[in-house]
Image: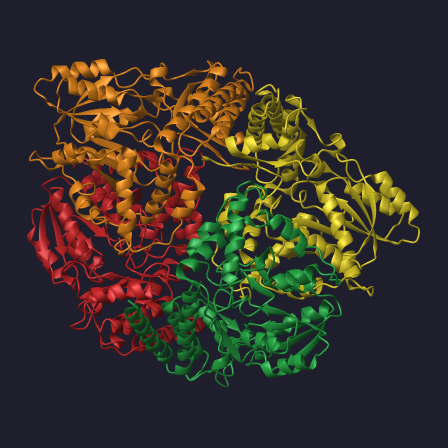
Chain colours: A red, B orange, C yellow, D green
């Protein structure tokens, strides 16, 4: 029998703050009530701020993030359209699979797992596409399976360098609202996010933030995909008045109000800085334990999730099972080819230093139980040192600024 | 400023019982946790009971009911397929629109609003289709806009009479779990329901209950529609193990557990009988006030929603506005061509006699405020008489049975 | 099996608004945390506003209202002290019982149930007490058992007329925050309230609002009663810093913050006006049904609870049982000598017109089922007429004021 | 601005499990409803099981534990009665203060803080009291201020050895339901507990478990103290029917149902074993950090709270402040003469190993920030080793038993 709080260190769903849980625990209301727009119009506006999307708009779909992936594709592309994609983990893989199912012709670049979007290979493909046949370029901002973050600004740069008009699609499900993301500045056309990660809500709502260019592409004369549930047109008409084309999950809107308030009260840049600080502490802890990340180098490190190789001879699934059963801790597992070799610590959302120390402590004891030769306390100590130092720096900066 | 409980008499979202709200107010959990299947496999099993579907299976999608409509079509039909549909209200209209958007060739029968699926016209179409070109027949079980229930068993009968192999699609969003529904007995192939009606949950989860025949159609050699989010195949593989192809809204599963428990504790037949009793009381009240239903006759009466014409010269929208602002009551409005002429009382879900009396009392006072000449108390008195009588009958039956 | 919302029409505990329930659903916190005073000092201040007590202070005890009665007595009186009390219902009776148990010498005036504090008899006693032996005069502001409100200002007036220094104790458990109460203006020295009535919280917290004079009496040289849990001194020392002498139920403080916010957002005078309007509607409904109140005349009518005689030959307990079992409605019962003859409708707290109409509708149907000859709908119709009229007046006043 | 879960490591209020929070989040109900006894009678019965009190009864008061202290004294003792007490911390001190305020003549034995009830001194006093003037012997089972547990069985033994008839009072607020307690076997007459510790509820409800002997003492002919709120008689009459003499906080009863279910599902002995294991881990961690407990030796160690001396030159209050502000952790502080020298880790209630590791990690980092020279990770590592070993032993025992 389990006792005490479950330590949830998966890369989403993340811990829903009590404030958000309270906000969501509302009686049902009329989705056509005159009061609803006062809530929803504010959300649409503030979501744009969260995505740093001043000129476009954000859609909210009752769906998982996968649904928003589909919405992005169906509304701007047609079967047979050529798209550029890279595969370097389970989630970029699933996105490729969706693209193919929906009839896109995928120019697929396979990348070693542990790295992200290959700017050079992308550049080659873009440079070669003089006819501008490539209608869209896809970037998985944060590959949740490997803990790898890709360089969106770099992709924008190479598109610009070649004056290539392709739409830029970004899967930001496990990055947006946790890791720096700048839709306008980076020229992202369709950015997908989900409620259950940096937005600190339960699963069930997805966000799709689209640029003016994407909206224009949606409306231009080229045929698009057959679609209905995820169609932009109906959403736009009704969203502009604060309503929705089908029954929306209004309880989520109340939760989102609270979570956006929390994000803005902290300040988005501070949210990103906190995620970086917490993540770096976890990485130091991993290093302190003598373990290796899947991410191939610091340039790929993800501030929302760390995928960690267990030592040779240790079964990562057994580590997770022990963590879950003995220590009431949920870690993420190794997906697809990483299965059994890797466990993942999600470090995003409503999180603080002590929670990360607890994650490391729990990882240490579970690893040890599973037969790994690690030095107990070494992970915690290394993270500890980093957090103290980081705090001191923040403190001095603060003092200096005053 | 508003005080007290909002009286929610719209035909969904319905009141979420406290027991369900409590059950849903859970911390997030790992959607791949070893404990999840113990919950979800039971839900899949019990949903089949709720749909009276012994041989097929039920899907749960993170979407509104509209999403399940799309899932039903995309997975069993192809663009260009011929389907038989009838339009007699806003929701049957929207379903037709979706069918057309997804490329189906709709044999559309227009029906006077206030009536439902026309068995004779359907029979004619079916009889005429010797080549069996019609791949599917669509039935809106309960048209929420007009308060009209159609005869699904009748449609099955005529299909059988003509040995027609068309798939039978049913929109049961505002009927299933409130009004008698028998998937196997009636040979329904794809039945759509949503969380926010008879299932007494918040909006955000849809159910699609499919027959063996529909599953076979999904897998046969004919091409289907391009699809990914709503694709059956991925769901089937993972659902069989108690999991899902993308992050599911696990909080809903806990709520669904509670709502199914409540439905079964009461007994489905008793749930239906209660809905009938409550609805009949409302109708008596409407009659007591000298008002007319949109439903063209008793054979069309819906036990989940009553659409009510306001007297000549009265603005139904003003009635609703008064109800909402002065009396903290949400009624449904008249949709599309019924706008301004009709208001609707939803009477489904977690409801009892006194709540229906309150609905009538609130309607009476709002109508009077809006200038309608009605006899105050006459609606309540008529419903009152019926409920007493119904109770007495139930009582005698009970006594007789003992 | 019961369905739908339970109609709670008892005179407390009252319906806790969802906003308050949400606010209270907090994780536990350190009762010595540096953050607590920011919450609690505001509550102490705002409670004074709610009691209209500018010069004294308000205590919060983890207890029922009965505990605050005891606190009031123990901290200002000594065994053997003479006090003036009147008994005219179950709650004034219990207060007398407590006074006697704690050793006070009660000058007890028995009053016919249905009336309240007898100003003439009180005046006689006060006038006769030239030696000022009477240390305290007790007034049950609102006798919950009979639905009778007493005239506190009148008592103050007679004390002043005779320059009598007695402390004025008021039981305001079922009045304060619902019915006009003015501690300073009326010279009330110790006013008792509970969380579960006008303050719209669950039961478990009591309030004792004390004047400067009461505080002085607490500290003067006369011996007081032995006491510890309810002792003022410890509370004062710690309350001034925002803390408490023993573990306080902090969840209530968050709820109280929300309920005070709601009261002030509406405006106390509007809260009182609303209670009067709702109560008057219920009384009209009672009259419309041909029933009689226990309250002996309009000057005694309570705006928070109506005690209603059932017709001769009808068993009030059966009415309540039917209401509870068949119609999911909780009415208050007849207490002590009113048992079986009376049922009570509580109409206080988070309440609106339609809820009162529902109460009447439920009373009507339950009475009829119990064999009462009443005209169904007559109660609702009478209340209905009053509410419409009241609304129109409010409207005109509003218009006139603009 | 704070983020993430607050780590609550105070010795109460403890973390309320989500299951209990959910159970408590109920609408208000009629405290005289026919359904209430089904809930409350089960609680009274099961509380007796929790106290291991087969022959007496348990009272529930809407009050803090301090109220139940007062109830115990007022109902069985009279002013001027002689009682034997020992003082060795803030809470035993407050109990003495109450006894004196209520007029008892306290034979007070001062004990060095860090030790508990002195069996030898108690025996001397009891042996000397040939006239049996001592009416009651008081034992603070667990002194929360110092983390010291006393030997109740030992006190019973010496009373029996001298055939002394004194009533045995036990303050079990921070022990019962966490540490082994056996009312019948140890002949405890009045045992006090509170909702917010081992019972895992919010603060606001107290329990007083009384023996037959205590009930007899309550009813015998000796005069008792004046009392009303906490009087046994009224409770007994109504409790026997499942009701209460004044409005009870019914929401707590639903929470208590859930918490008792959790305690029994785990098994009381397993609950005690878990508390011991978790506590021992924390103590190992404290030792690993080179710190000293206030408890003077293993025979005094408390399994619910550890009071820890900070190193010379470090300010314990600063450690706590840092923990609270930088690391979102609430530790208990040093009370009275321990102020500034001690911080306390509460380790009781709904707790597991990783939470204790987090407590140590947080203590380590806070201590370091406050200038303590400690080896980061040393505390975690020591606890870690113990938990692994404990788990292995539990495992082997389990295997052996099978």
Q: Residue D153 location in percent, x, y? A: 54, 74
Q: Is residue A149 left or right of residue B12?
A: left
Instruction: Say which of C185 and C363 sits in front.
Output: C363
Q: Is residue A231 above or below residue D177?
A: above
How many circles with numbers are drawn on the protein?
0
Q: Residue B144 location in percent, x, y? A: 34, 26
Q: Residue C388 location in percent, x, y? A: 59, 24
Q: Is residue D35 above or below residue D75?
A: above
Which of the 4 image quadrants contains residue D205? bottom right
Q: Confirm whether residue C230 shows in the render.
A: no
Instruction: Say which of B226 and C3 sits in front.
Output: C3
Q: Is residue C78 left or right of residue B101?
A: right
Q: Confirm whether residue A107 shows in the render.
A: yes
Which of the 4 image quadrants contains residue D286? bottom left
Q: Residue B269 location in percent, x, y? A: 35, 29
Q: Is residue C266 left or right of residue B213?
A: right
Image quarter in which the N terminus of chain A is found? bottom left
Q: Is residue C170 above or below residue D78?
A: above
Residue sitting at 72 percent across and 66 percent down?
D102
Q: Is residue B159 left or right of residue D70?
A: left
Instruction: Determine the residue located farthest toward the bottom in the rendered image.
Output: D312
Which of the 4 image quadrants contains residue A42? top left
Instruction: Say which of D201 and B400 sits in front.
Output: B400
């Amino acid at each position: 029998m389990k006792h005490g709080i479950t330590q949830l260190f998966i890369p989403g769903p993340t811990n829903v703050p009590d404030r958000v849980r309270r906000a969501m625990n509302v009686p049902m209301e009329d989705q056509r009530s005159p009061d609803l727009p006062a809530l929803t119009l504010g959300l649409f506006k503030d979501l744009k701020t969260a995505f740093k999307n001043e000129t476009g708009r954000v859609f909210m779909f009752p769906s998982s993030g996968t649904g928003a992936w589909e919405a992005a594709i169906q509304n701007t592309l047609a079967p047979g359209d050529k798209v550029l994609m890279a595969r370097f983990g389970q989630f970029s893989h699933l996105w490729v699979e969706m693209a193919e199912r929906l009839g896109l012709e995928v120019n697929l670049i396979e990348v070693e797992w542990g790295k992200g979007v290959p700017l050079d290979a992308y550049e080659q493909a873009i440079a070669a596409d003089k006819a501008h046949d490539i209608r869209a370029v896809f970037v998985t901002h944060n590959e949740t399976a490997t803990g790898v973050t890709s360089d969106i600004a770099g992709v924008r740069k190479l598109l610009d360098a070649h004056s290539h008009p392709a739409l830029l699609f970004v899967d930001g499900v496990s990055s947006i609202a946790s890791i720096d993301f700048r839709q306008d500045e980076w020229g992202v056309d369709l950015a997908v996010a989900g409620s259950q990660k940096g937005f600190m809500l339960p699963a069930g709502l997805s966000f799709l933030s689209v640029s003016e260019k994407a909206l224009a592409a949606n409306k231009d004369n080229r045929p698009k995909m057959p679609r209905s549930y995820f169609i932009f047109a109906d959403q736009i008409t009704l969203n502009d008045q604060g309503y929705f084309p089908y029954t929306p999950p209004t309880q989520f809107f109340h939760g989102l109000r609270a979570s956006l308030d929390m994000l803005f009260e902290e300040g988005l840049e501070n949210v990103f800085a906190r995620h970086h600080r917490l993540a770096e502490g976890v990485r130091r802890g991993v290093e302190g334990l003598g373990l290796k990340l899947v991410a191939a180098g610091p340039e790929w490190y993800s501030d929302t999730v760390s995928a960690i190789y267990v030592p040779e001879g240790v079964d990562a699934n057994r580590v997770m099972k022990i963590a879950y059963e003995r220590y009431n801790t949920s870690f993420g597992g190794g997906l697809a080819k990483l299965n059994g070799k890797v466990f993942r610590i999600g470090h995003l959302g409503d999180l603080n230093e002590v929670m990360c120390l607890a994650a490391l402590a729990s990882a240490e004891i579970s690893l040890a139980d599973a037969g790994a030769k690690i030095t107990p306390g070494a992970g915690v100590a290394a993270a500890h040192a980093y957090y103290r130092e980081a705090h001191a720096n923040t403190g001095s900066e603060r003092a200096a600024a005053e």
